[in-house]
Image: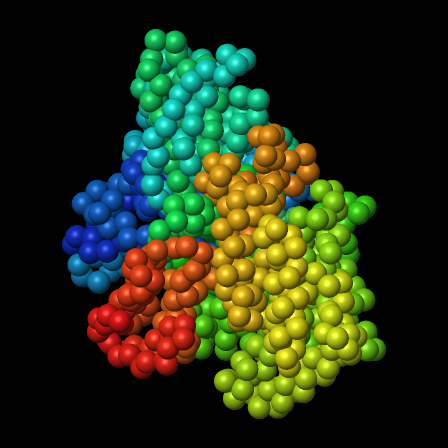
Amino acid sequence: MLHTARMISPAVELGSAPLFRTEITLDTGHGAVTRATLTISSLGVHEARIGGRPVGEDVLSPGWTSYEHRLRYLSHDVTELIAGKPLSVLTVLVGNGWYRGRLGFMGGSALYGDRLGVIAACEITFTDGHRQVVVTDGTWTAGNSDVLADDLYDGQTIDARRRSGKWFVPDGEPEWFLPVRVLDFDNGVLTPYIGEWVSRQESVPPRKVWESPTGRMLIDFGQNLVGWLRFTVRGPAGSEIRIRHAEVLEDGELGVRPLRDAQATDRFILSGGDDLFEPTMTFHGFRYAEVSGWPADVPLDVEAVVVHSRLERTGDFACSDELLNRLHRNVVWSTRGNFLDLPTDCPQRNERLGWTGDIAVFAPSAAYLYDVRGFLGDWLTDLAAEQRAADGLVPFVIPDVLKYQPAPPDFPDPDSTAFWSDAAVWVPWTLWQAYGDRSILAKQYASMTAHVRRVRTLLSPSGVWDGSFQFGDWLDPDAPADAPAKAKADPGVVATAAYYRSLTLVAETAALLGHDADAAEFTELAARVRIAFSSEYVDADGTVRSDCTTVYTLAIVFGLLDDTSFAGRRLAELVADSGYRVSTGFAGTPYITDALTVTGHLDAAYRLLLERECPSWLYPVTMGATTIWERWDSMLPDGTINPGEMTSFNHYALGAVADWMHRTIGGIAPLEPGYSRVSIAPRPGGGLTWARAGLRTRHGRIEVSWRTGPDGDLAVDVTLPDGVTGVLSLDGRPEVEISAGTHSF
Ligand code: RAM
């Protein structure tokens, strides 16, 4: 419907977020309106209203895609807003968002363009079949709104004195509205959403309000979340309420240093009447807010609004250990905080980018917790588009905005990197395993193969991937705070192991899709890389180069060794030597519990998971964390914030252990993609006395629960939905075939 619409922009730069406006006069003589649909997109984030009422529940639309290639639109049923009214007013407020606001840690803004715009078509059908279409064109107008400033990183300023009753009512143009101009814009980039749009999800009341040591009013919402504050207030006209946000406190005040130069500050200027404030053109990652300028005699009455993509929750997990349950809830909250339109590394500082490595390892956990088929499918479409424009290279972040910014002196040149670029293969593979829909593989096939073919050109003559920059085992706790890539694990070992994994998955994909020649090519290449790995990196006694936990983990889990007994033993030894504290970074952490489990060291896996001293998964929980942290010690044991430049308190990557919890403690794993056949193999341990896990699959809900009796007996209940068969495997027992229904063992 948008093909006849034009992208319009204010003809002159306004001093606030532009409010676009048109009046829709219904055609007469065709009977009543039977249906009206508004299809809309924008350069910048928009909010459309008819007669002042929002056309949908979405916020921050159209989100962030690789705008050079894809700009998404939404369609809203607006029949109720239009029918029966001879004249309606359609307004669209457009903020800077990802298009024109600040983006990236290098300080740029307006990376995609400096003109905000809107494109829309309203299609109205009448009882006699007549169709009326109203589109954006040069007849629209634009005026100043009440949004004086808006930026995703810095926050929003709203002046309620600027609000006008004239905006939304059909009695002629407000006299201060100005002409628009039609932009030169390629409608060919317009595309529907593949995934879900962003909306308000929940509101959280303050847990505690108090005065800080320096006399500031602070609010604790009890949960590190992503969104904004909302409130209605009446106070002196022209006075300003200012809200600052932070994830943590330091010395009793907001700890804003981790935000780097993101201001995360909203300002509200009061009109003197009852004002509703909600800064919907920004978002903040915060648990604490500092409020200044609240009217003296008015009780504080605010709520935090949680905002993210509208994903359906599918998986749950609980067990007898409350700290583990909190860890799991933290994973869920970090997913929520970072699944705001696209999978980001963090939601609070001047970054919030679609870092590929983070989601490459976290996707299996996410795909259990939520139905992320559309959400990640959408992002993968951008990944493939960026890659096509970059000769097969999967950039560090998707959408790739780093390409628009001058790299800092110490920043690596863009090239394929293990784990990060492997997202091109691992994420689609995860979706295939979780949902059993092979179309995702077909759709991503060109991207998957382009990635592994490109990396082939980067291999050394010996056949390993050791010649180019790697993030490697990023944020190994033993790496210097200011050099997170300087891990114990040899970067070539990490990269070659990851490449081998990608090759085996792409070979399997090729076979599945019937690309036999490709399957043969990648199988053969995988075999060569595996041999090269052994001859370059594995000593005669089995020692893997750099002899640390991550290299054994990856060699075991990615299948690089014929015999894993030495590697398993050595891994368990190293884990014990480190006192069961975590010794791995982004690469090793997601897989170490699996590596221990499959080599017969389940106890060590549990001890590692249950350790509370720093660095460990539970250390942050003991420090009161309500989300997963970027660093094991984002907050140091003395309560101060890690002095490093990168100190997020909401980063899902290290939460990837949730996948192991679901499969190994909970006991649910797919035997066939999409869980039509399922492995039920809970492995009790770590002193847990019960656990339960549930997963809604396309067939229905799978449930497993177990408890141990006083004499060490194990009782297991399993429910499989119709259409699902399973294999129950309990330690030391023969496997049992199970069918749909509820079974107790
Ligand atoms: C940081 C990001 C991200 C990581 C990269 C390499 O800036 O936060 O988590 O993937 O570095």
Q: Position of residue 472 (x, y in %)?
A: 70, 59
- Quadrant for the C terminus, please: bottom left
Is 244 placed above or below 737 here? above
Report whether residue 8 is seen.
Answer: no
Quadrant of the rendered image containing residue 250: top right
The N terminus: image quadrant: bottom left
* 619 on left or right of 665: right
Work out which residue is located at the far front of the displayed protein and give it. 711
Q: Position of residue 505 (x, y in %)?
A: 57, 77
Query: Toward the viewer: 511 or 548?
Result: 548
Color scheme of the displayed model: rainbow
Residue 460 visible within the image: yes
Q: How many marks?
A: 0
Q: Is residue 293 left or right of residue 394?
A: left
- Residue 332 on image: x %, y %: 42, 50
Q: Residue at x 72, y 74 (%)?
A: 542
Residue 72 versus residue 158 in the image, above or below: below
- List x then y, in percent, for residue 628: 51, 46
Tell me what residue is drawn at x 71 percent, y 42 percent.
481
Identity of the residue drawn at 64% across and 64% down: 571
Q: Is residue 212 above or below residue 279?
A: above
Q: Furthest residue to the top?
A: 297
Q: Residue at x 66, y 48 (%)?
A: 477
Residue 52 vertical position relative to residue 83 in the rendered view, above or below: above
